[in-house]
Image (cartoon, rainbow, N blue to C red):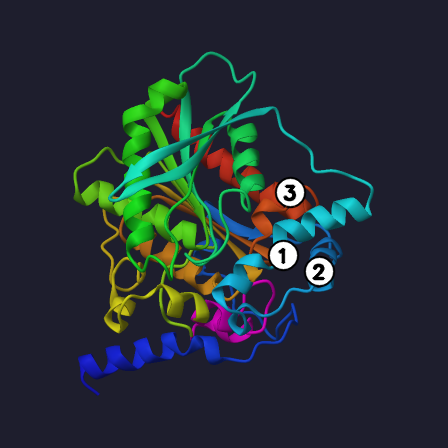
Amino acid sequence: MNHSLRMSALAAHLLAGAAMLVSTGAYAQEQPKPNPLAETPDSGTMKRADKEDMTVVLKKLQDLGVKPIDSRSVAEARAQPSPADAVKAVLKDQGKSAPMPAVKMQDMTYPIADGTQPLRIYTPENAGPGPLPVIVYYHGGGWVIADINTYESSALALAAKTKAIVVSVEYRHAPEHKFPAAHEDSFAAYKWVLANAGTFGGDPARVAVAGESAGGNLAANVAIMARDQKVQMPLHMLLVYPISGTDMNTPSYIANQNAMPLSKGAMGWFVGQTLAKPEDAMSPMLNLTTKADLAGLPPATVITAEIDPLMSDGVMLAEKLKAAGVATTYLNNEGVTHEFFGMDAVLDDARRAQDFAVKDLTAAFNKK
């Protein structure tokens, strides 16, 4: 099969993902092994903290009536309860409320090609004298669903724990705005932060990028665009279960094809909604591990979840970064699923993963 036929076949496979039938089972069969970086001093595997916590959240998500994303219309998928809603419901059942860190919030906008997009600035209180370092954070949702409100817990935790300002970025979503609209907006937001950090107490010389899932892909691409366009590079990249390829036959896609809250079918649906044309499936922006040039990027922290179709994506990205000479730490978290990172209100595993990330971010900000 020649290259063009292979490309068309892959694109057709991706665009047909929405037709897959997906169960709501959370646990899959044999899990893929973590990557070889786990055997090095700067990487590892986090053993599960509590076997019940993750199950409780997933059960609550089912109780809230969530249906497989790939069986929903875009409007229905956006209206469904999110994992963040499940966490709030679990806390309510326990007679608790989510702890509110001592963080101030301010809503602003930044300019894009044909208008503006929202962003939210989280400033930790009692962080000491400024200016403070800044983390530009990109939320997940497959470039189609969710927003800065859905992922607020992650932004709050990072701000409180790093004592840095977190700028959580909204961007245009597919299918209304196809690829690469979200990537273009993400870079515009990063450049806006560099130019305006001083106006909200941030240090423009100490800026990192971070993201979860689709947002992890955006964060990595922002660093690549900064390098290629000779814009100030971020000091560090925090990439949490990032989308880093379009191969949906990796070990973790196979092992976790029916996982909650993210399945193989859901990923096919997201990609199908996002691509403007079939050949976009071959873009280096979507294929960080096979087509992108990763040399010269800032140090990275890559965090994955064991029960997640994207675990292999994170594994391969960590390996590719390290092979390109990028200082990289990697952490796989056993017994948890996609979206666990922001569940610190109910998951010890999330708190520990956040602490792992914060250690690297703090070191990057304090490096002379």
Q: In this view, does 112 lie above or below 132?
A: below
Instruction: For mark 2, give the secondary structure.
Output: loop
> What residue sits right under mark 3 in the picture?
344
Earlier in the chain: of badge 2 and badge 1, it is 2
- Residue 229 in view in this figure: yes
Quarter of the picture containing the N terminus is bottom left
At horizontal 39% and vertical 66% (from top left) the residue drawn is 273
> What residue sits right under mark 1 in the picture?
81
Quadrant in the picture for residue 345: top right
Choose between 36 and 284: the one closer to the eye: 284
**CA gap, disc 2 and disc 1:** 7 Å
x, y percent for residue 138: 42, 44
**CA gap, disc 3 and disc 1:** 18 Å
**CA gap, disc 3 and disc 2:** 20 Å
At horizontal 38% and vertical 33% (from top left) the residue drawn is 109
Quadrant in the picture for residue 319: bottom left
Marks 2/1 in contact by CB < 8 Å: the verdict is yes
Q: Which disc number belongs to residue 211? A: none
- Residue 298 in view in this figure: no
Crowd class of label 3 (few under 14; some 14 to 19; many from 20; radius 10 Å): many
At horizontal 30% and vertical 62% (from top left) the residue drawn is 287
Choose between 18 and 40: the one closer to the eye: 18
Crowd class of label 1 (few under 14; some 14 to 19; many from 20; radius 10 Å): some
Amino acid type shown at disc 3: Asp
Q: What stretch is highlighted in magenta?
A: 249-268
Choose between 292 and 114: the one closer to the eye: 114
How many numbered marks, from 0 up? Answer: 3
Give the residue furthest to the bottom.
1
> What residue sits right under mark 2 in the picture?
64
At horizontal 41% and vertical 50% (from top left) the residue drawn is 216
Q: Is 267 one of the magenta-colored residues?
A: yes
Q: Is 133 one of the magenta-colored residues?
A: no
